[in-house]
Image (cartoon, rainbow, N blue to C red):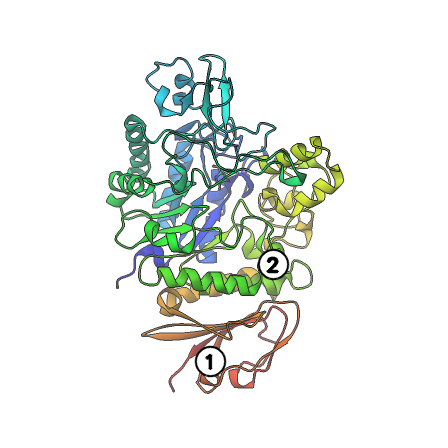
Amino acid sequence: MEKRWWQEAVVYQIYCKSFCDSNGDGIGDIRGVISKLPMIKDLGVDCIWFNPLYKSPMVDNGYDISDYEDIEPAYGTMDDFKELLDKAHSMGIRVIMDLVLNHTSDEHKWFKESRKSKDNPYRNFYYWRPAKPDGKEPNNWGNYFYEGRGSAWEFDEQTGEYYLHNYSYRMPDLNWEYEPLREAMYKMMRFWLDMGIDGFRLDAVNRLKKPEGLPDSQKPPTPPVGIHGYVVDRTICANVPGIHELLREIARNTWDNYDVMTVGETGQVTADMAPDFVGADNHELNMIFHFELGKNAKIITPKIYKETQKRWFTVTEHNGWEAQFLSNHDTPRQVSRFGNDGEYRVESAKLLATLTHTFPGTPFVYQGEEIGMTNVYFDSIDDYDERYTVGKYYTAVEAGADPEETLKMLQPLSRDNVRTPYQWNDSENAGFTTGKPWIKVNPRYKEINLEADLKSKDSIFEYYKKIIKMRKNCPAMVDGKLDFYMFDHESMLVYTRSCARQTLLIIANYSDNPVKIEIPEELKSKNFTRILSNREETSPSLLKEREEWLPWETEIYELTTN
Ligand code: NOJ
C-alpha cells in the first residue's frame, strides 16, 4: 500500500526553551532554532515537533496556554514562527505543533471570563461545580501536580464554586461537552492548519472526555507517603466512553481535511486498545505515544522491551501505525535510563538509536539524544524547575521525609534531566546562551557536546545520520514484518524486518557484558551482509564468523541474494 509521508519520516523533537538562545536572555527561542536548521537538515530528519510555542505564563513550560493563536514572547513573534516554517519547508523539513486540548492556563481570556460570574458566556468552557452539601470539594479526585494541594478542585472566591484541574490549579480543564468550546477549538486548530503546519502532537488527548456525572474515584488520593507524595488515580479521566466519537468529531472538523500527521499522547492506553485510536479507517489519530515502557526511571529489561514491541506490532501490523521513542521532554535521558551513561555511553547511545529506528513505526528523536546527552544530578532542590520534582520534594519533606534522601531519589526521575540546555560546544554554558541559562547546564558539557562529538571518530551524530539515511533506502525499515529469534534470551535482541523487496537482520547486545550466542542456522546459512555497526573496527563483519558480541554492540545486516 502507498505509504503516507509520516510513515517514512523521522521526527526530531525540539524543546525550544532549551535548544538555542539567540538573544542572550537565557531562554531558547525561535530565532535560535532558525540558526540551527542547517544542523537539523544535516541530521537528515524530515520533520520537527515543537513543544508548545504558544503564549504562556510558563507554569508548566508552555503546556499552560494563555493564547492559542499567539507565540510566547520569550520565544519570539508570530513573524519569527512564520519565517521558521517557511525556511524549514524550503529545506524539506516539515513542522508539527504540540497542541494542548485538555486545559488552558488560568490566564487564558476564556478562563478569566468564565470565573467572573455563573452566567458568563464562557462559564461552561470549564468545569465549575458547587461544594458538596458537607462543604467539601465536588468529588474526591486528586490532581497530578503535587503542589501541596491534593484535590483536583480549586475553590474560587468570586463565584463561590470550584473548578476542575487535573494538572496544576493554574491549568483548568476544558469542558468538551460544551459545543461552543468545541467550535472555538476547531477554529483555532484550522488557524494553524491553514497557516501550513504539518500536523499536531496532541497532549493528553485521551483525557478530554470526563466520566458522566464526575463520580468519585474508587481510589482516592492517598496521604503523602515517601517521595511519591500522594498517589492519584490517573485512570478516571482516561479513555472514558465517548472519547472515540469525540476524536472522530475533532478529526472531521480539522486534520482529516489536510495532509498532516497526528500523534496522540495517550497514557493508560495498552496495546489492545491501540486499534481503536489508530485503526487505519477510524479517522482518529495516525499514531500514539504509549507508556508501556514506563514514564519514569523504571528499569526496563531487554525482555520486557522485546515483549512490548511484539505486543504492539501484533495489534498494529494490519491496522494502524506505531510511534517509536525512548525519551521525550517528560522522561529521563535515554542513555542514562536504558543504556550506560559511563563507560559505554557512546556504544549504548548508538544501540538505542538502532532500536528506535529499526522497530516498526515512525522514529522520534529527542534533542540531545543524537549526541548522547545524559541525566543531570543537581545537589539542591533550588536548581530544579519542573513542577513534579519540586512539588514531590516538598510534599515528601513536609510529611517528614529526609531532605537529602528525597532529593537523591528524585534526581533520576526528574523531567529536568532532559530539559537542561542543548550542549553545542565546550564554551561557557555549552554555547547555548551568552546570558544566564534559565536552568543550569549539565556539567558534563565539556566532554559531551556536538562539536566534540563531530570531531570524534566514534561520533554518535554521524551514526544517527547513517541510520536516518538508511531509512530512505531500506523499505524493510518502514514496511517490514517483525520476527524475533532467540526471543527468550535475556540480553540479546535478534530480529528481522522483511518485506517483498528486502530483509534486514538486527542484532544487539543490550548489556554491559560480552555475550556468546549461537545464531540460528536458518540465519547463519544465509547471505547476510553487514550494513551498519557500532563496533566496526573491533568485530568481524561476517555473520557466520560471529560468536561473541561485545557490550552494547549492535549491527544491521541485509540479506543479499548473490
Ligand atoms: C503531558 C506533557 O507532555 C507534559 O509535559 C505536561 O506537563 C502535561 N501533559 C500537561 O499538559
Asked whether, in this view, residue 133 is left or right of residue 418, the answer is left
Tell me if I can see residue 206 in this picture.
yes
Q: Residues within 10 Å of mark 2 (few under 14, many from 20)?
A: many
Q: Quadrant of the N terminus?
A: bottom left
Q: Residue 170 versus residue 424: which sits nearer the camera?
A: 170
- Could you say which is closer to the camera, residue 248 or residue 558? 248
The answer to whether residue 288 is left or right of residue 411 is left
Relative to residue 516, is residue 249 depicted above or below?
above
Lateral position of residue 382 relative to residue 305, left or right: right
Instruction: Give residue 446's position: percent from left, percent from top.
Output: 68, 51
Q: Which sits earlier in the primary sequence, circle 1 or circle 2?
A: 2
Q: Residue at coordinates 35% horizontally, 22% vertically from top-left?
A: 124
Residue at the spot of label 1: 529
Question: Residue 131, how many percent across, how many down?
Answer: 47, 19
- x, y (%) of residue 472? 38, 65
Question: Viewer-proximal residue, 482 or 73?
Answer: 482
Q: Is mark 1 within 8 Å of ligand 1?
A: no
Q: Of the residues shown, which amino acid type is indicated by label 1?
A: Thr
Check disc 1: other Cα within 10 Å, few if <14, some if 14-19, many if 20+: some
In the rendered image, residue 359, in percent from the top left (x then y), is placed at 44, 64
Quarter of the rendering occupied by the C terminus: bottom left
Q: Amino acid at mark 2?
A: Asp
Q: Which mark is residue 453?
A: 2
Disc 1/disc 2 C-alpha distance (Å): 28 Å
Judged from the image, the secondary structure of the residue bearing numbered disc 1 is: strand
